[in-house]
Image (cartoon, rainbow, N blue to C red):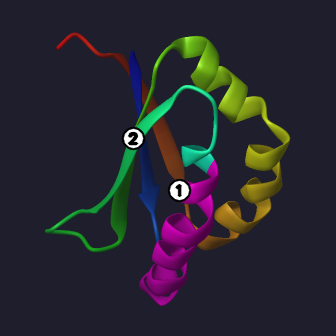
Amino acid sequence: MIERHLNFRVDPDNADAFERFMTSEYGPAMARAPGFVRHDLLREADDRSRYLLAFRFGDADSAAAWRTSEVHQALQPALKALHGGMTVQGYDVIA
């Protein structure tokens, strides 16, 4: 199993729209992808402009298939318009 963490910087003026997009469009689309396990959207307590999207797929191939899927690619322009920067970190789930 693999887990990825996407860290976003979101302008406060875009926070509501970002949260709506992630919970009503991006998250549900990802949840329909083969191999999907779970996702969580977190907002940093000390800096409300920082978000973490943590998600798991059963294996790296499933995660890669999501990342290159037409559905994921179609969501990218809207997502990019709502944040001011993103970093990605990948993990192998041990326990």
Quick check: is 58 in the magenta stretch?
no
Q: Count neighbours of disc 1 (C-alpha within 10 A) and say few if under 14, some if 14 to 19, many if 20 or more.
A: some
The structure residue drawn at horizontal position 46% and vertical position 74%, both measured from the top left corner, is 19
What number is the disc on residue 38? 2
Q: Name the residue under label 1.
A: 27
- Majority SS type along the magenta span: helix
* Front in this rendered view, residue 41 or 32: 32
Is residue 54 among what the camera can see? Answer: no
The structure residue drawn at horizontal position 45% and vertical position 56%, both measured from the top left corner, is 8
Amino acid, disc 2: Arg
* Front in this rendered view, residue 70 or 91: 70
The structure residue drawn at horizontal position 14% and vertical position 68%, both measured from the top left corner, is 46
**Residue 62's spot in the image, x, y percent?**
61, 21
Amino acid, disc 1: Gly
Q: Earlier in the sequence, mark 2 or mark 1?
A: 1
Is 69 situated above or below 58? Answer: below
Measured in 3D between alpha carbons, the distance from the residue under mark 2 to the one under mark 1, in whole angstroms, is: 9 Å
Is 55 situated above or below 49? Answer: above
**Residue 72's spot in the image, x, y percent?**
73, 46
Say which element carries label 2: strand
* Front in this rendered view, residue 22 or 7: 22
Magenta span of residues: 11-29
The quadrant of the rendering that contains the C terminus is top left
Say which element carries label 1: helix
